[in-house]
Image (cartoon, grey):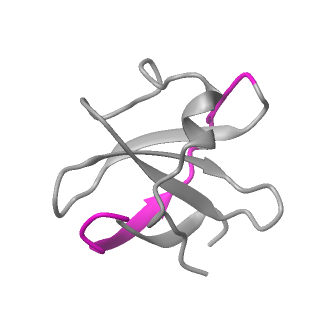
């Protein structure tokens, strides 16, 4: 199914399903952006869809779990966790 993928938390390596939105938030740089929490450890995660391969790229977020109304500007993605990854 397009838009569905297994993702892995960069902190605890917990794995869970991610489903892309039919009405996604597009940030100021044109990236499809998401905010969510790990279902295992609860850490806040922010991510964008990589337009080259359609995979979700994640990074840890300090503080509260991001969502469509609290996602910071695109600059948060210039400082990704060294452990951030997407499963292919």
Query: Residue 71: image x %, image y %?
Result: 48, 26
Residue 13: say if magenta.
yes
Residue 8: say if magenta.
no
Looking at the figure, which quarter contains the N terminus? bottom right
Q: Is residue 7 left or right of residue 32?
A: left
Q: Residue at x 46, y 51 (%)?
A: 59
Secondary structure mostly seen in magenta is: loop
Q: Is residue 77 left or right of residue 58?
A: right
**Quarter holding residue 32:** top right
Stretch of the chain drawn in magenta: 10-28
**Quarter holding residue 27:** top right
Examine the rendered structure and indicate whether residue 40 appears above or below residue 29.
below
Examine the rendered structure and indicate whether residue 65 appears above or below residue 60.
above
Q: Residue at x 17, y 64 (%)?
A: 40
Looking at the figure, which quarter contains the C terminus? bottom right
Q: Is residue 20 left or right of residue 66?
A: right
Q: Is residue 16 left or right of residue 1?
A: left
């Amino acid at each position: 199914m397009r838009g569905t993928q297994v993702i892995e938390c960069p902190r605890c390596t917990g794995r869970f399903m991610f489903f892309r939105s039919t009405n996604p938030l597009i940030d100021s740089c044109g990236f499809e952006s998401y905010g969510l929490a790990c279902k295992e450890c609860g850490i806040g995660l922010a991510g964008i869809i990589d337009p080259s391969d359609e995979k979700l790229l994640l990074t840890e977020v300090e503080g509260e779990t991001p969502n469509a109304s609290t996602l910071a500007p695109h600059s948060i993605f210039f400082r990704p966790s060294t452990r951030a990854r997407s499963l292919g």
